[in-house]
Amino acid sequence: MANEPAVGIHDLSFATTEFVLPHTVLAEHNGTDIGKYHHGIGQWSMSVAAADEDIVTMGAAAAAPLVRRHGSDGIRTILFATESSIDQAKSAGIYVHSLLGLDSATRVVELKQACYGATAALQFAVGLVRRDPGQRVLVIASDVSKYELDSPGEATQGAAAVALLVGADPALVRVEEPSGVFTADVMDFWRPNYREAALVDGQESIGAYLLAVQGSWKDYTEQGGRTLDEFAAFCYHQPFTKMAYKAHRHLLNYCGHGVDEDRVSRDLGPTTAYNSVIGNSYTASVYLALAALLDQRDDLDDRPVGFLSYGSGSVAEFFAGTVAPGYRDHLRTTAHRDAIDRRKPVDYVRYRALHEHSFPTDGGDHPTLADTTGPFRLAALRGHKRIYETR
Ligand code: CAA
């Protein structure tokens, strides 16, 4: 609508874990040629959560800088997207709301649709702000990606949270209409309530992702979207960074373009920098790709970026966002690099112990080791309640 203000991402901040496992360590343990990890799937290291970290501590650490910079006035909604939920009933966002000391006049809800949930949250946030441009919505995408030890998915694990402040006249990205959407009932990746690690059919999941790329693009064009050549870059969901390359080549082919590898690298290269060292952060992944893009490219003023969000099961959405002029003045590039560089490497034995860590389910008092040096920690599980602390 001509007189409506632009709505979109006003600020973006991410957080990741205390620990990191280099893929060289995993390769040495399982005898895999490191070329498979570095070049075959495009992963160099994975973030590993400490026993006193989870989706809440990461989500709060990602969101706190947004609240510090902009205050909390006008934030009446928190949308927390995750597929590694910690409670079947209570939204993880309520803990974040409490840790950040936000006003009680706030609605808080958790959303789930595998790795797609954050994009649903972003679109819902845009709708809320369009209804009342004076409001701002805090969208938090936070996940710990966990597969069985010694399974093919293990090398793609990771963990991170991205917080987005959505509002009118955004300083970073104006979210455009239309969106192309796609749903298909497939069992490519899922996690029954009784399991900590996801189940996955790897090759089926790659096929399902590619089908969703073409399905959401087809709907996007039918809704009157932009042409492929208009985009300055593409942010894909990155379960592993080479998946973005597979998806983009597939889209180019589907659109009848030849696959020019220089073009593919130009379109995607900068978007993979954070995912390649953090690993799969599920719902956060496509917005980590955006963070890496904005932090590295300085030529995006007023240029459209394509977003392809995929969540197994499956739902996908293709939409465009135009980068706001002057975006570089609002970035958090140094903090983002620090979040990655501050992680402490763990050896295989420590990684395995952290992977296998879980709380007893007896309702007793179970304090955690004080491992993380981040601003928030999960101090204990006490009487079936998660106890968080602020440093
Ligand atoms: N040097 C260089 N490359 C090598 C190599 C070497 N020594 N050895 C193997 N490779 C290459 C292979 O050729 C292959 O490349 P292509 O895909 O381009 O052919 C690549 O490394 C991977 O090899 P494999 O297919 O043999 O690997 P795998 O069987 O161990 O499994 C996987 C790969 C299926 C992605 C597995 O990691 C997995 O199950 N991951 C979890 C599921 C997943 O991420 N699915 C993605 C879509 S679903 C989604 O997006 C939602 C989500 O977040 C989970």
Image (cartoon, rainbow, N blue to C red):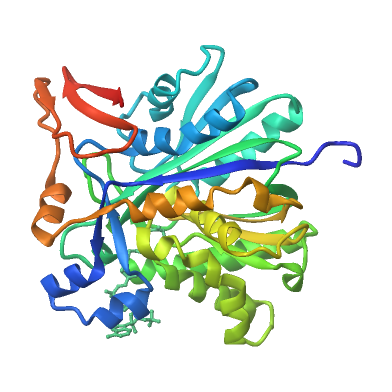
The quarter holding residue 276 reads: bottom left
Between 16 and 113, which is closer to the camera in this rendering?
16
Query: Is 2 left, or right, of 190 in this rendering?
Result: right
Comparing 86 with 351, the one in front is: 351
Q: Is residue 317 above or below residue 358?
A: below
| Residue 294 position within the rendered picture, expressed as x and y whole percent measured from the top left | 60, 57
Ligand 1 rendered quadrant: bottom left
Residue found 20% across the figure and 65% down from its top: 151
> Where the C terminus falls, by quadrant?
top left
- The reply, left or right, for residue 12 in relation to residue 37 is right
Q: x and y percent of residue 283 in the render?
A: 45, 48
At 29% from the left and 80% from the top, the residue drawn is 36
Residue 196: % across, % down: 22, 45
**Quadrant hosting residue 52:** top left
In this view of the protein, can residue 313 be seen by the observer?
Answer: no
Q: Quadrant of the N terminus?
A: top right
Q: Position of residue 346 (x, y in %)?
A: 17, 56
Indicate whether 47 appears above or below 240: above
Residue positioned most to the top:
104
